[in-house]
């Protein structure tokens, strides 16, 4: 297995500048320089959770549309319905919970997200703004052929999803 993800302090503006450096280096970036210019990605960022922010205004507009602003044509997103039922049972603010669940991931060309299961095995919507992304999907009955990073007795409880190492033997 690899190293677990670690937070790095910085702003979205810093990250955008960093992605610009990678873009400008483009094909001139030799493979041996990859460690000097790693492909970091920002994941789990919830710009919609901040009350009064620009992201929150877009999120509220989508909520008023019945969550159809970004959903594919003909698809009804019922996430808000389930979040309301769950939060009402626990006396928790459903809007705040839902706003935190809608997260953004940013990454430069060449960034890799390791094989994982979404937290609580949740379904995920993916909207691509620019570039390309490849997904490798495994059927649920294949889960026995994958294993959590760290193995038995690991301190990794899989809070961010169970990570599996496709390069390890025994798959």
Image: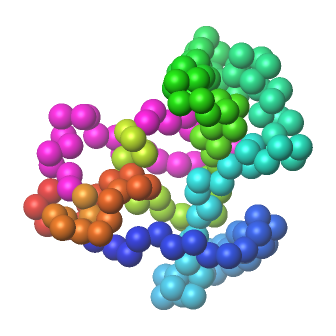
| Residue shown at 32% from the left, 65% from the top | 156
Q: Which coloring applies here?
A: rainbow
Q: Is residue 50 left or right of residue 111?
A: right
As rendered, which of 34 and 168 lies closer to the eye?
A: 168
Q: Residue 157: image x %, image y %?
A: 32, 59
Does the rendering let one see residue 85? yes
As drawn, which residue projects farthest toward the left?
A: 170
Residue 62 against residue 25 in the figure, above or below:
above
Q: Give the range drawn in magenta.
A: 122-147
Looking at the rendered structure, the number of numbered marks drawn on it comes to 0
As rendered, which of 41 and 25 lies closer to the eye?
A: 41
Q: Residue 110: image x %, image y %?
A: 54, 65
Q: Residue 107: image x %, image y %?
A: 62, 60
Residue 76 against residue 87 in the figure, above or below:
above
| Residue shown at 55% from the left, 78% from the top | 38
Q: In this view, does 129 lie to the left or right of 119?
A: right
Q: In this view, does 165 lie to the left or right of 135?
A: left
Does the rendering let one see residue 130? no
Quarter-of-image position of residue 167: bottom left
| Residue shown at 14% from the left, 45% from the top | 144
Split into 4 quadrants, where in the image is the C terminus?
A: bottom left
Q: Residue 8: image x %, image y %?
A: 62, 75
| Residue shown at 39% from the left, 41% from the top | 120
Q: Main secondary structure of the magenta part?
A: loop
Split into 4 quadrants, where in the image is the N terminus?
A: bottom left
As drawn, which residue projects farthest toward the front?
A: 91
Residue 148 against residue 39 in the figure, above or below:
above
- In reply to whether residue 6 is colored magenta, the answer given is no
Quarter-of-image position of residue 98: top right
- In reply to whether residue 130 is colored magenta, the answer given is yes
């Amino acid at each position: 297995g690899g190293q677990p993800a670690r937070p790095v302090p910085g702003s979205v503006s810093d990250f955008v500048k960093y992605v610009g450096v990678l873009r400008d280096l483009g094909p001139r970036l030799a493979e041996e320089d990859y460690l000097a210019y790693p492909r970091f990605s920002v994941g789990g960022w919830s710009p919609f959770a901040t009350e009064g922010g620009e992201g929150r205004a877009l999120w509220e507009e989508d909520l008023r549309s019945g969550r159809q602003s970004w959903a594919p044509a003909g698809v009804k997103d019922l996430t808000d319905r389930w979040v309301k039922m769950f939060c009402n049972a626990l006396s928790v603010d459903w809007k705040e919970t839902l706003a935190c669940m809608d997260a953004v991931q940013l990454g430069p060309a060449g960034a890799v997200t390791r094989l994982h299961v979404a937290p609580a095995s949740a379904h995920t919507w993916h909207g691509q703004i620019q570039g390309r992304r490849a997904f490798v999907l495994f059927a649920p009955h294949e889960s026995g052929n994958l294993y959590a990073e760290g193995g038995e007795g690991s301190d990794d409880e899989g809070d961010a999803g169970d990570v599996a190492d496709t390069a390890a033997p025994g798959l």
